[in-house]
Amino acid sequence: MRSNRPYVQIDPDVLEQARQIDLLSYLRAYEPSNLVKVKGTTNVYCTAEHDSLKISKGKWYWWSRGFGGYSALDYLMKVKEYGFVEAVETLTGQTMADWKPPPSAVKKDEPRKLALDQRLINNMLPDNDTSKAATYVSKAFEIWEQTKEQKSAQLIFCDLSTPKGDGTFNVYEDIKNKLVGKGVPPEEIAFIHEGATRSCI
């Protein structure tokens, strides 16, 4: 009874509910005619379909096939050959296809990162020329062009992202690269992290 149903997501609470159902409880509730007490025992059962499949103390073992399990979920998949989703649905009475996971919680600093540059959230996202970082580049270049004869200095404060030098995206190096691309000499741009002592700050 294996199914070719496409992948569906299952509510973890529902899955845990299915895993907690033991085979004896399942057979008593859903297949009472298939449950047979083994003669001469007090708590050993088998199934009418398979008399070598013994159930005792929360476990079951199919002796003629050489495998067993603990739960009704194991039984439905290994013995009845249900697909995983069908087995969970049978045990819980719930249809899994309609369940959607709850939205992930937004991390506290994610909105600030998105506003600065969306690549701080996912470096596979494209560059956005309307981000705060892009605005800083335009303004800094404008000031540099107006004051380069006087060799004026300007500071850009950024409390998100840190240059690590390992190839990962960071706003510091992105701003520098864009300014250099516009014509600012690279030796005129420095990061505070490059200062060896506090006197350099």
Image (cartoon, grey):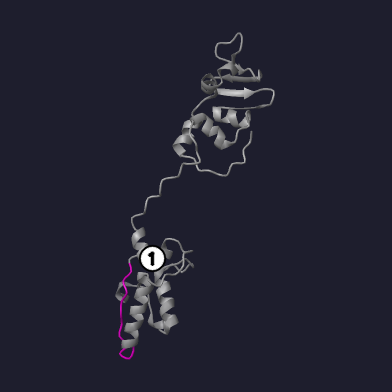
Magenta segment's dominant SS is loop
The vertical placement of 141 against 87, above or below, is below
User: Which quadrant would residue 101 be assigned to in this image?
Assistant: top left
- Counting labels gives 1
Q: Which residues are magenta?
A: 147-158
Position of residue 25 measured from the top left corner of the image (x, y, whole percent)? 51, 21
Answer yes or no: is residue 71 visible: no
* Of residues 32 and 41, the one drawn nearer to the viewer in this rendering: 32
Quadrant for the N terminus, please. Answer: top right
Whether the magenta-drawn stretch holds residue 125 is answered as: no
Three-letter code for the amino acid on which mark 1 is drawn: Ser
Q: Is residue 21 above or below residue 103?
A: above
Residue at the far top: name it.
Answer: 40
Foreground residue, 107 or 194?
Answer: 107
Give above or below for 133 relative to 71. Answer: below
Q: Secondary structure at mark 1?
A: loop
**Residue that numbered label 1 is attached to:** 161
| Residue at the outermost bottom position | 149
Residue 138 is situated, as x and y percent measured from the top left of the image, at 36, 78
* Quadrant location, the C terminus: bottom left
